[in-house]
Amino acid sequence: MSDFFSAFAGDLPRLSSGLWVTLQATVLGALLALLLSFVLGLMSISRLLVSRGVSRVVVEFFRGTSLYVQLFWLYYAMPPLTGYELTPLLCGVIAFGLNYGAYGAEVVRGAINSVPRAQYEAAVALNMTPLHRMRKVILPQAWVQMIPSLTNLLIQLLKCTPLLWLISAADLMTAIEKLRSRTGETLTAYVTLLACYFVLAYALTLLMNMLERSAKRRLGLASGGKSLLRSRSAVTAPAAGGAR
Amino acid sequence: MNEGFDWNAAGDALPLLLQGFKVTLLATVLGTLVAAVLGLAIAVAGRAPTRFVTVPVKMVMEFIRSTPLLVQLVGAAALFTSVEPLTIGIVVLGIHYATYTSEVYRAGIDGVPKGQWEACRALSMTPRRTWQAVILPQAVRNVLPALGNYAISMFKETPFLAVITVQEMVFEARKYGGDHFAYTEVFTLAGLVFLVASYPTSLLMRKLEKRLGH
């Protein structure tokens, strides 16, 4: 056991660069996913049949084919087919972004639909343009609804990043795997690794709770400081094969 | 390097993939069963009257739910080398998903009107009989769509089992791809098989949810 932790201390540079790769994959993947969620989600409530159709097809495609297969397709199958080769980290960011963007689109759609109908009508009555209406009335209210589900998706995304180990990106899991095989301390190594991910997940949850609190404040809904420490709830799964 | 899509390789690999797909389905079904039963047990334990039970249960669940399934799988496989990989996969998948399904059950149990509990007390039913005859039948019917959703997500996460050498579809795909240098064909096919299998289920779940008025 002490063997492991002295090796752990000796390996800190590699571990921290692994942590950096994991964080990069999480944050960049999440940003891509957020962008896609809004684009696809707004498209799916559009009045144009074409835009609704395109969004539906894209969402079903990326939700229907497993993330694992998507990641491996990008890493192994795309280079021979197209001649382009992506770095492992980029593969991860794209696969995570596309997959969770598809799940996020349903969250965005559901949240926008849950804004009371009267709010639309009031905005129309005040002669707001559609863009103004969306920006000033609908989205601020929908955003508060979205945050808990998006937090769940973000943690899901973080939990998928160890997949990078399989496509030889030097992420946190790779670093600790190497340590494990050198010291032979299997149990300690995996418990340490799980603890690292738990700390990361909890930190991200705290950040998202802060975001939720400030979004609520803007709507005049105060929530106490205690709400920041709250853990995620698992029952926000949106309709039909939705995110966990 | 071979360019383009080799149809012969695809036709060659398809039977192997479908054979692996059987294992994928088996793992999904058994994993869902474990998750459904264990989740219910956790949900009932979470309503125990003493905090000595509820607080540790909640902490363990939070930990399992916040850490990656892949690490849990690889860790379990490295620790229990004498157990068959498929068994480890099913148990780990089941436990991981039980932390989610327990929340679903909890919501379902909370959704049973308070009057039902009071009526049982008035009829002086034992707690066991209250759960069995009154609360659970109503709760379980409400949670079926959500459980179905988790079954679909579990289905899409079974490829993780390939890492601990369970010979499911993606394992076969990687093996064939490596042997014949045909990664493009096998991974495209594997993706399509997932799409074909999960899209109708997802449609069905949506219909079911609409019918139940969610």
Image (spheres, coloured by chain):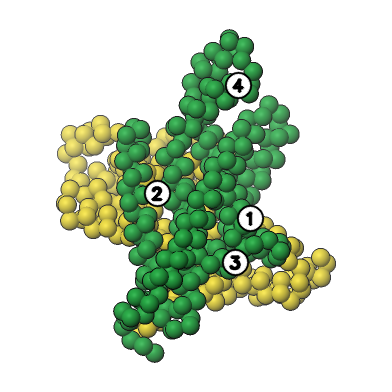
Chain colours: A yellow, B green
On the rendered image, what quadrant is the N terminus of chain B found in? Answer: bottom left
Label 3: which secondary element = helix
Residue A241 is marked as 2
Residue A232 higher or lower than A171, as above or below: above
Within-10-Å neighbours for mark 2: few <14, some 14–19, many 20+:
many
Let me know if marks 2 and 1 both belong to one chain: yes
Question: How far from the left and from the top, in percent, is residue B49?
Answer: 68, 26
Tell me the amino acid under the disc marked 3. Answer: Ile
Pinpoint the chain carrying mark 1.
A
Q: What is the quadrant of residue B80 in the picture?
A: bottom right
Q: Given contact means CB atoms under 8 Å apart, are the residues at marks 3 and 1 in contact?
A: no
Residue at 34% from the left image edge and 32% from the top image edge: B213
How far apart marks 4 and 2 lie (CA) works out to 34 Å
Tell me the amino acid under the disc marked 4. Answer: Arg
The earlier-in-sequence mark between 4 and 3 is 4
How far apart marks 4 and 1 lie (CA) works out to 42 Å
